[in-house]
Image (tube, rainbow, N blue to C red):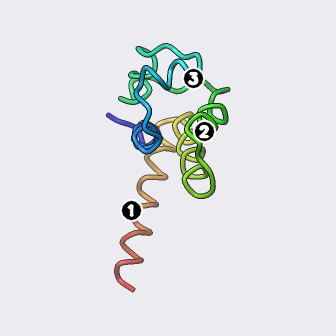
Amino acid sequence: MRSDFGAQLDHALTAAGLSQRGFCRLVAFNQGSLQGVLSGRRTPPRDRAETWADALRLTGEPRTAFLEAYLLSLSPPGVINLVARLRAELAGRRKRR
C-alpha cells in the first residue's frame, strides 16, 4: 500500500520536474530504495527528510506537509491508521458545516 509520504514525494518530484534518477543523484540515494519508499514497501531513512525537502525546493505549506508525511511514515501502523481515521472524521465534519 502506498504511503502518504510516498504520494507526497511522488507529487514533489513531479512538481520539481525531477526524475527518480535525477533526484537520487542530487541526494546520493539508491534508486531502487527510492522506489521502495515511493511504493510504501520501505520506510524513508530517518536523516533524509530535510535534505530531500531542500533538493525538491519545497517551502511553506508544501514543505510542512512533506515533512509531516515523512514523520508519520516512521510511526507504527496503529498510529498511521488512527491519524487516517481522524483525518477522515475531520473531513466529514467539515463537509457537514
Q: Residue at x 41, y 25 (%)?
A: 20
Percent position of residue 45, x then y: 59, 23
Residue that badge 1 annotates: 88
Measure the C-alpha gap from mark 1 to mark 3: 35 Å
Secondary structure found at label 3: helix
Exactly how many numbered labels are in the figure?
3
* Mark number displayed over residue 26: 3
What is the three-letter code of the residue carrying label 2?
Ala
Q: Position of residue 15 (x, y in %)?
A: 43, 45
Tell me: residue 49, above or below residue 91: above
Say what amino acid the circle numbered 1 marks: Ala
Picture quadrant where residue 3 is located? top left
User: Which secondary structure, mark 1?
Assistant: helix
Mark nearer the N terminus (3 vs 2): 3
Instruction: Work out which quarter of the rendered image holds the C terminus and state it.
Output: bottom left
| Closest to the observer, 91 or 77 | 91
Q: Are marks 1 and 2 in contact (CB under 8 Å)?
A: no
Q: Residues within 10 Å of mark 1 (few under 14, many from 20)?
A: few
Q: Is 88 situated above or below 28? A: below
